[in-house]
Image (cartoon, grey):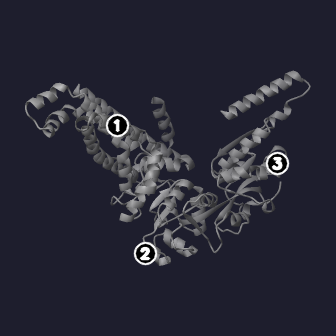
């Protein structure tokens, strides 16, 4: 609806301009369209950024499509899209083919109910808990109670990152509860003192400061917080990245700069991601 | 309705053509990213939660309607009726939230992990209770006064009147109510999603977590692509067909009795 209205606005604007000032050509309008495709993790954030960008630049139209990180790379390589979106950093084999620009960080924290006496778990213990080898809190220094393992539903990007970091297959996980979004995970763990789960760190921190009985465990000895995600020391995190085939110029460059600017930090935080600190930018366009 | 059905068919068709209907029943597991699409555990999940809830809610609903219609003083009956109507209007996510913070921890103390088939059944019972209670109430109100007077004249006890006269006379209405509540129990998504645990498995006890067809769609649709997406539309199609069959059954019951 908003898009339609916007295109109508652009149209009427161009007609109006054309009528009032015939000398002014509208050739520049043709190049004012930007297409982004790729990761379903990045797409919601980029859609929001695009809306804000369109609001500031009414003559621009931005089209955001999902289809997975691999599609983002393929479309950018074949110039089907101006910008590809991927939910990871570029692999070494890809860095010479693409230019990448991180726009946010996504971090995942292990959460327990706050009265659970367990203060830390090492990676081995977490793997054993999720594969069912450890099924009682007593074995990791907690109370004598069975562990409720909370896992994410298939297809969620948090699940992928979790599995990748702990080198697990989803079929190995012996879950007791499977949840959808972060909020459901937080409510499930906060309501069950024997549960263990994992959610976006941004979401967990916000709820903890609002008084929800949760605790975030450190991973690999690194405290889980937006700071450690932001400075890159927290291991269970990844950059959300925009990629282009060529060094960006014109509108593409403008949009990428906008997506990395402080103007969009509120949008990044609203999606439970962590903004990139300016000095951590992988590459400036 | 036809549009929705057509849309579901169109979206589900690619996968029905490429992997066939059999895959949904015989594949090893539900793991769409690895091309296996077994819906059977979720069909069981839906069946068990719905059946359990209907078995619990029907007698409770009928008893509540009898109380309302024949035992309670007028003032209490009308207040009680309002309460039940209110219960019917509570959004399902509120039921789910209540279940998650109250019911699930309670069941967890009994037998972990708490999020379970039992929690689903209890929440659903609560949700469909108003449906059957209100329909039964309306049905009892339509039992002709003459029947009641006749029963009283023959000296039947009030329990005898209910058992011998009222229940047989309102059979078709009660059936319609039951079909309505089955429909609601099968279609309910949010509340069961929140309390059932959503593990894809055929439950081996009432304390085991289950995933229903509706919960499966709600959980995975946002992130599903290609065949995975189509597979979810197939489960939607399945649900819609069950609901249509139920609607037809309800019509048949009505026709049979008029």
The one nearer the camera, B64 or B1, is: B64
Farthest top residue? A19
Q: Name the residue that disc number 1 marks.
A: B79
Looking at the rendered structure, the secondary structure element under dot 3 is helix
Q: In this view, does B7 lie to the left or right of A40?
A: left
In this rendering, the label closer to the viewer, 2 or 1: 1
Q: Mark 2 vs mark 1: tell me if same chain.
A: no
In this rendering, the label closer to the viewer, 1 or 3: 1
Q: Name the residue that disc number 2 marks.
A: A144
Asked if residue B37 can be seen in this view, the reply is no
Q: Is residue A67 left or right of residue B30?
A: right
Q: In this view, does A11 lie above or below A276?
A: above
Return the disc, 3 or 2, that comes first in the chain's sequence: 2
Q: Quadrant of residue B203?
A: bottom left
Task: Name the chain letter of the residue that bears numbered label 2.
Answer: A
Task: Name the chain letter of the residue that bears numbered label 1.
Answer: B
């Amino acid at each position: 609806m908003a898009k339609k209205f916007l295109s109508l606005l652009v149209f009427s604007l161009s007609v109006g301009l054309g009528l009032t000032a015939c000398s002014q050509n509208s050739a520049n309008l043709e190049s004012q369209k930007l297409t982004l495709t790729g990761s379903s993790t990045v797409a919601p954030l980029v859609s929001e950024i695009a809306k804000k960008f369109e609001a500031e630049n009414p003559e621009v139209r931005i089209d955001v499509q999902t289809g997975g990180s691999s599609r983002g790379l393929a479309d950018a390589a074949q110039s089907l899209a101006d910008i590809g979106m991927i939910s990871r950093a570029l692999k070494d084999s890809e860095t010479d083919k693409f230019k990448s620009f991180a726009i946010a960080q996504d971090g995942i924290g292990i959460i327990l109910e706050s009265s659970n006496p367990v203060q830390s778990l090492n990676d081995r213990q977490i793997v054993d808990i999720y594969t069912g080898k450890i099924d009682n809190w007593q074995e990791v220094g907690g109370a004598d109670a069975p562990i409720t393992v909370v896992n994410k539903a298939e297809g969620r990007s948090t699940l992928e990152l979790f599995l990748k970091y702990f080198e697990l297959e989803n079929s190995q996980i012996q879950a007791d509860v499977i949840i959808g979004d972060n909020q459901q995970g937080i409510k499930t763990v906060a309501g069950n003192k024997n549960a263990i789960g994992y959610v976006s760190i941004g979401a967990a921190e916000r709820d903890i400061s609002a008084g929800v009985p949760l605790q975030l465990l450190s991973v690999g000895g690194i405290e889980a917080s937006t700071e450690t995600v932001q400075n890159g020391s927290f291991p269970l995190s990844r950059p959300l990245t925009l990629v282009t085939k060529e060094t960006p110029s014109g509108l593409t460059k403008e949009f990428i700069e906008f997506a990395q600017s402080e103007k969009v930090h509120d949008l990044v935080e609203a999606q439970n991601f962590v903004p990139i600190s300016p000095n951590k930018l992988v590459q400036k366009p | 309705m036809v549009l929705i059905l057509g849309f579901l068919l169109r979206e589900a068709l690619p996968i029905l053509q490429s992997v066939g209907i059999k895959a949904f029943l015989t594949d090893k597991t539900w793991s769409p990213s690895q091309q296996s699409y077994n819906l059977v555990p979720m069909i069981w999940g839906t069946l068990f939660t719905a059946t359990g809830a209907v078995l619990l809610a029907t007698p409770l609903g009928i008893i509540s309607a009898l109380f309302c219609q024949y035992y309670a003083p007028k003032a209490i009956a009308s207040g009680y009726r309002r309460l039940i109507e209110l219960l019917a209007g509570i959004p399902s996510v509120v039921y789910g939230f209540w279940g998650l913070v109250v019911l699930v921890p309670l069941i967890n103390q009994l037998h972990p992990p708490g999020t379970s088939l039992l929690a689903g059944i209890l929440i659903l019972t609560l949700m469909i209770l108003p449906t059957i209670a209100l329909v039964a109430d309306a049905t009892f109100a339509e039992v002709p006064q003459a029947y009641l007077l006749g029963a009283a004249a023959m000296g039947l006890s009030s329990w005898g009147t209910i058992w011998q006269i009222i229940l047989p006379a309102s059979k078709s209405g009660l059936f319609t109510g039951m079909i309505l509540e089955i429909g609601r129990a099968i279609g309910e998504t949010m509340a069961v999603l929140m309390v059932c645990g959503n593990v894809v498995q055929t439950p081996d006890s009432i304390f085991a977590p289950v995933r229903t067809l509706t919960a499966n769609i709600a959980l995975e649709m946002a992130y599903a692509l290609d065949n995975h997406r189509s597979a979810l539309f197939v489960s939607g199609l399945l649900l819609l067909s069950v609901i249509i069959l139920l609607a037809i059954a309800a019509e048949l019951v009505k026709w049979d009795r008029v």
